[in-house]
Amino acid sequence: MQTVFRLCLICAITTLFSCGGGSGNSNNNTVWKVELAFSRVDNPSGLDPFTVDATILRDGSPTAGLQPLIQLGRGTHDAVSDLGDGRYRFTVTPDQTGEYPVTVSFETGSLTRTALVLKSVHADWGQPMSVPGLVNTEGYEDGATITPDGQYLFVQTGPQYFSGLFVFLAPRANGGCGGDRLNPVICHHPWLDTLPGTYTAPERPGFFDGRFSGSTFLHNSNAFGIDIDQAPIFAFATMFYGFKKQPDGSFSEPFYVAFDDLNDAIANPFGMSFRMNADGSATMIFAHNDGDPGAVVDQDNDNLTAAVDSGFDVYTLDITPGQNTSLGQYTVGNPPVRGSFFPSAQVNFDKTGTEGAYGTQGNPHLYVLNDGSIDSIWTDDEFDGDDADPGNDSDIGDLSVYTLSSG
């Protein structure tokens, strides 16, 4: 089974600073609201503690002399100090790396934010935080990008365990699948077969669910014509979702930007980059390998033979942020066949030579000048280890820059 997705190192979607508010009404119509701000305390000898400033507002005014309730998901905190200006300060001491949910409540006002404790943090950084809102789930989030105006955050996301990849690759003798789910017998493991994350509203409305049954991963493919539990590999089901920034700094109002691949959620864009347009639309570029057997290029510049798979290429499409967008359709095939509806257009890098479309143009970045014009496109040639050998897909860290000559 040929896949059209790229696997990335899993990352927690984080911000360096966080503040926000939670509010509610009490019986006497008083409105209580809590705002939280986090700061990291440098600790050269161990894990960094973090200080929390909780501002409690009564009908919009910071109010001193209260006793807020503090709840931690892990770790311990010292005594709460009333700073006299509506702020209440305490410091959390971690006992291990990971996520640290912090909830501060008073009367009907309550707010939870999650700090991320890392083994090492650069001195210039503040306190890393989990992005609040509907972005993070118990499943998989990766490949974060944000629009230049800071109003929309995009992530690649799916309901499965990322750690299932390691089980799939591990030798059978060690409890893994040895890189083949089917041979010598079908390989099963909770990390392969169970979906810990959500794929429904409110977090993921419209997620393509043709490879799920409840919390079970079916290991099938509609687009490839593969029956349930007959996929030889562990093919992730992921889609790109965007989230709009809210007044409190959280990101919600999810929408997807995806290929319609018969409800598989296998075909995906990668490495999104954006230019915001005056009419409210956004010009998006992304990397994609559609598996088209005709997508071959002339690798040696002799203008005679086009014999090398072009690999991942850069595509573009104007989208309306906040609205679901189909990048194109695929029909059944092995690999799936591009359908008649395919609004995404391939960027022309000239289909000749090692400086053209041959090989991988991954994770593209759209370099936009201050006047809004496009200067160049930068790409990560992450699978092109040896230009003299088209079959060498090792990563030697090359980048390519393509300057705009017209259009």
Image: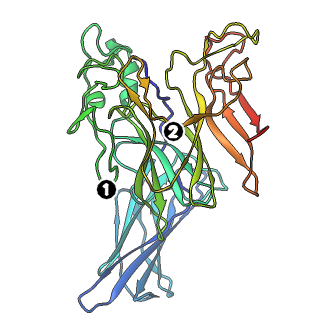
Q: How is the image coloured?
A: rainbow
Q: Which residue is mark 2?
A: 343
Choose the circle earlier in sequence order: 1 or 2: 1
Three-letter code for the amino acid on which mark 2 is drawn: Pro
The answer for how far apart the CA atoms under marks 1 and 2 are is 28 Å
Q: Quadrant for the C terminus, please.
A: top right
Please tell me the numbered disc located at residue 83: none
Rendering coords of residue 39 (x, y %): 55, 65
Q: Nearer the viewer, residue 394 or 34?
A: 394
Q: Nearer the viewer, residue 375 or 231?
A: 375
Rendering coords of residue 65 (x, y %): 41, 89
Q: Residue at horizontal 52%, vertical 56%?
A: 152
Q: Nearer the viewer, residue 240 or 90?
A: 240
130 w.r.t. 402: above or below: below
Q: Residue at horizontal 39%, vertical 63%?
A: 102
In the image, farthest residue toward the front: 340
Rendered image quadrant of residue 123: bottom right
In the image, farthest residue toward the bottom: 28
Rendering coords of residue 375 (x, y %): 76, 45
Q: Residue at horizontal 69%, vertical 14%?
A: 386
Q: Nearer the viewer, residue 210 or 260?
A: 260
In the image, farthest residue toward the left: 214
Three-letter code for the amino acid on which mark 1 is drawn: Pro
Rendering coords of residue 395 (x, y %): 63, 22
Which tag is nearer the camera, tag 1 or tag 2? 2
Q: Secondary structure at mark 2?
A: loop
Question: Going by the image, does 352 lie left or right of 276?
Answer: right
57 w.r.t. 187: above or below: below
Please tell me the numbered disc located at residue 202: 1
Callout 2 crowding tier (Cα within 10 Å): few <14, some 14–19, many ≥20: some
